[in-house]
Image: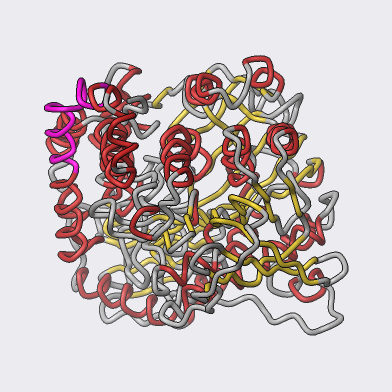
Amino acid sequence: MQQLLYLEIPTPDTDSVRSWLRDRFTTPFGNKQLTPDGFTISDRQDSASANHPQLCVFVWSLQRTTYLKAFRWSERAIEGESQILQSLTQQIREAFPYTYPQPPAIAPGTSIFEALAPQYPLTVKYFQQFPQGEYDLNRVYWWEQRWRESVKNPQQPKQVVFRDPTTDSQPPTYDLIYLGGALGAIHAAMMAKLGYRVCLIERLPFARMNREWNISRAEFEGLVEFGLFTQAEFESIVLREYVDGFNKFFDGNNPQHLKAAVLHTPKVLNVAIDHNKLLHICGAKMRQYGGEIIDRTEFDRVTVHSDRVTVEARSLVDGSQIQITGRAIVDAMGSASAIAQQINYGRAFDSVCPTVGAVLEGIEPEVWDTAYGDVLFSHGDISRGRQLIWELFPVSGKEMAVYLFHYHQVHPENPGSMLDLYEDFFTILPEYRRCDMDKLIWKKATFGYIPGHFSINGNSRRVAFDRLLAIGDAASLQSPLVFTGFGSLVRNLPRLTTLLDIALKHDLLSAEDLNQINAYQSNIAVTWLFSKGMMVPTGMHLPPERINSMLNTFFGVLAAQPEAVSDRFIKDRLGWPMFNRLAVIAAMQNPALIAWIWEMAGAGDMAKWLGSYVAFTGSAIANALFGGWLPQFLCKFQPAIESKSPKLWLRLLAWSYALNYSLGKTKL
């Protein structure tokens, strides 16, 4: 028996594919005989002989997708075998092409459940079981519509930032106005502690989030060392610290040399954070130092004056208009930020991870031990043009946070759908973790778009406008592997707040100055090629096992390394020698890897990646020459340089941080 063909048919309607194979496919050669799941083709009517060559074609369903395989039941090919397989491939792709359905419009007075039920029946069914299901499903719909609009019309972003050169004799009310209350609250708490007057505007009720947070103990304790939290406060927000985390990708269809062992990462994302309590602590610190929080308020526009910014917003409670002034704005509104779209001239992000999931109870302990987590896991091959990946993190008690996501090329016709992904989530969760869906207790929906940007260097995406700075996913200077905006902010908070402190002290608030304050790391930027290899270009048909083969190559190499190596890689702390050593090992283990990436990325993106690699190499050389001594040396001269030329000191300090941060070293 020999496998000749393996196809992914991008439709959940396996019955239609089965009927098409039986009733509509016409073979150019041989005799077609029907079977329950497809057909066989033989050279002649008499095919009973055991040695007679025969093709067997059948389909099955997994991951709300249809798959097809063709086997030959002998060593000898049947007449016209290659033509039969070529014709089958062509015809079935014409009959079942990729489709990218859009969510329906919701008529006034129609409930979200009523509007979405025909297209997303399981999503509606289970959202009705969440405590705030209708509210959360409206949020999913809102985020998807906003994301789709930003991708569909990237050259025509809505103008929300305006200029007005006038000044005012009255000083602004605040030093910093934060837009977005999740990552914004952490940053704002630190700036308030440094003595600045801060105001935070949040669209949701304060401390309510669409996603859970996980981090490692060592990563978060960096904030304790920096002085934002006490050790007792940190311990109070730890919900669960698991024993080990697993990374494993489906390899049932991979050749033997591309099967991989489980990668154990016991110190990656192994601490579940009570984000509600964390944000309330941040809010209390802000208020303690004179800050203010205005929640359930929608940002409308900002006007940049020569000496201030004026923010106009609208209360979602009573519709009243709000107008406040500050010296500068910090945009922490995430991937759907209209400000980020405008200041980057409408340029869409290069990649995105649509992510959906839930906090739930009810998965039996014999199925999953809550002392362990799934960091990255796949249970099947490419599904409707996406490689679906699971995450599972224990939360508190018997609760678990389960996520489903995929790395996705941003494309106007195919921006990536959270609603479609939620329908996948509720359909295939029992495939991933054996469970009775109707016995699960649904605690909270978790969802979002996690954007990525393929940076050649730190200047390839603007993070600032005059008196305006973006942080977190609104800035998105690189493509995430595991860490998202939360991990990036935790890692970069010391340099972001220290540099902003200097800028505010000396009124260095032009776009040129504020662009020095960013979370760019050349060692992360160079790894975007890995995420590029995890996404199927829109409309391209790849062998279904291709992405799992690539992931097993990378993670198989990591599994063979000491734990410290995989820990640094997944925590975005990879250095130049380690990166090159791992890349060479992966290429030797799988020589086809570069050709596969070339096929998926194309010559243009490969050239961009070479630019990123050159920048990474330059950072490594600079770190080797200067990283060990120059930052400390410059700090000795801070008073003299800062007093005579604050602008120069801001740039020198930003460069000092970049020397080490670009190699994953998060201290001066």
- Tell me what residue is drawn at x 64 percent, y 40 percent: 212
Residue 101 lies, in percent from the top left, at 56, 77
> Quarter-wise, where is residue 618 in the image?
top left
For residue 114, side relative to residue 22 (left or right): right
- Tell me what residue is drawn at x 66 percent, y 37 percent: 401
Q: How is the image coloured?
A: secondary structure
> Quarter-wise, where is residue 310 in the image?
bottom right
- Tell me what residue is drawn at x 30 percent, y 22 percent: 565
Up the image or down, 340 lies above or below 156; here it is above
Label count reads 0
Secondary structure character of the magenta stretch overall: helix
Residue 232 lies, in percent from the top left, at 68, 15
The front one of 156 and 656 is 656
Q: Is residue 625 magenta?
A: yes
Up the image or down, 111 lies above or below 330; here it is below
Residue 514 lies, in percent from the top left, at 40, 53
Q: Is residue 502 visible?
A: yes
The front one of 527 and 384 is 527
Image quarter (top left, top right, bottom left or bottom right) of the C terminus: top left
- Tell me what residue is drawn at x 58 percent, y 77 percent: 102
Q: Which residues are magenta?
A: 616-632
> Quarter-wise, where is residue 539 in the image?
bottom left
Residue 660 lies, in percent from the top left, at 27, 30
Q: Is residue 497 magenta?
A: no
The front one of 59 and 383 is 383
Q: Is residue 545 visible?
A: no
The front one of 544 and 666 is 666
Up the image or down, 42 lies above or below 458; here it is below
For residue 5, side relative to residue 213 (left or right): left
